[in-house]
Amino acid sequence: MQGNLPTIAILGGTGKEGTGLALRWAHAGYSIIIGSRQLEKAQAAAAELNAQLGAALVSGMENADAARKADLCVLTVVQGAHQQALESLKEALQGKVLVDATARVDFRDPRPPEPPAAARHAQTLLGPGVRVVAAFQNVPAHSLKKNLGKSLNTDVLICADDTDAAQEVMLLAEAIGMRAYYAGMLDNAIIVEGLTAILINLNKHYNTKTASISVTGIDVQSLGN
Ligand SMILES: NC(=O)c1ccc[n+]([C@@H]2O[C@H](COP(=O)([O-])OP(=O)(O)OC[C@H]3O[C@@H](n4cnc5c(N)ncnc54)[C@H](OP(=O)(O)O)[C@@H]3O)[C@@H](O)[C@H]2O)c1
């Protein structure tokens, strides 16, 4: 922990989504570990982020070491490596909250994925010793890297069987400028993954890279989430 903020490991964190989340959380004061299959690649990504931040807030480790060292882990491996990464990290993740950002959508042919949700699959594979939370599947990497420290004007739908774990992740989303909503149990994450297919279609049709989602009709302030 840094102060009372959890240390976050981003597994497969050398890619587009992982480095975007890392940049925002590090800028907000969280201690970040970038995980990779290769130590040197993790350290190089961390060094690049620290150069952008102007401070040594990010370190790099192999994925399993990063998972063991962190209070909470975020999985951002490329979608095709989801199962393989989970199998190799099962032991290291025991006792942790794992945030799964996986959206199994092909950029070239974006369609809704088949159930079960990637995060449900993760929960089944990892077992009850890991509390899986699905989040950030609709947050474009392109937006994360822009306007650091400012609100993203995007919403995050959080699905989890464990509402305490969901609450922890809602705080993390809010800390980096997003509005977060608890959207039900892990099975609902299949809809959130499917929304990514729609967002990719919107990006293509309207020639942008930053389509995202916004929930209306809920006064989060008055509900206290
Ligand atoms: N890009 C977006 O805008 C976006 C938005 C929302 C959600 N997501 C989700 O976030 C996840 C990552 O997307 P991305 O665009 O960041 O992907 P990416 O840049 O293509 O890849 C992420 C990382 O996956 C790791 N990886 C590749 N093959 C692997 C394997 N066989 N085993 C373990 N790790 C492997 C690599 O890390 P190392 O080589 O360092 O191990 C790579 O840096 C996906 O599930 C995607 O659906 C992405």
Image (cartoon, grey):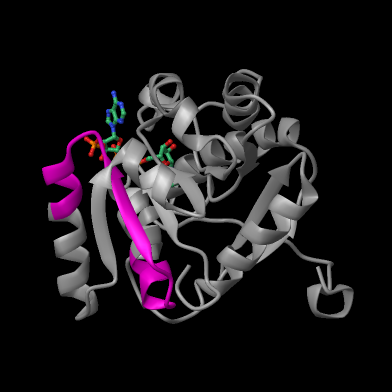
Q: Quadrant for ligand 1?
A: top left
> Can the viewer see residue 12?
no
- Horizontal placement of 187 versus 42: left or right? right
Residue at 20% over, 70% down? 50
User: Is residue 34 highlighted in magenta?
Assistant: yes
Q: Is residue 13 above or below residue 144?
A: above
User: In which image quadrant can residue 32 be found?
Assistant: bottom left
The image position of residue 197, as x and y in percent, is: 52, 35
Quarter that holds the C terminus:
bottom right
Question: Residue visible at 57% across and 44% down?
Answer: 96
Q: Which residue is drawn at 44% across and 20% down?
A: 87
Q: How many labels does the image show?
A: 0
Whole-percent x, y for residue 30 in the image: 43, 71
Q: Where is residue 220 in the image (x, y as percent from the top left)?
A: 80, 73
Residue located 15% across and 73% down the image: 51
Please name whichever residue, 107 or 23, is drawn nearer the observer in this view of the structure: 23
For this rendering, which residue is in front, 218 or 72? 72
Q: Give the percent coordinates (x, y) of residue 202.
A: 49, 47
Q: Is residue 110 above or below residue 223?
A: above
Q: Which residues make up the magenta segment?
A: 23-43
Determine whether 217 is above or below 113 in the image.
below
When asked about the image quadrant of residue 182, the answer is bottom right
Decide whether residue 108 is among the magenta residues.
no
| Residue at the limit of the structure toward the right, as seen here | 223
Residue toward you, 165 or 203: 165
- In the figure, is residue 139 to the left or right of 129? left
141 sits to left or right of 45: right
Compare residues 87 and 1 and report the one nearer the observer. 1
Quadrant of the rendered image containing residue 99: top right
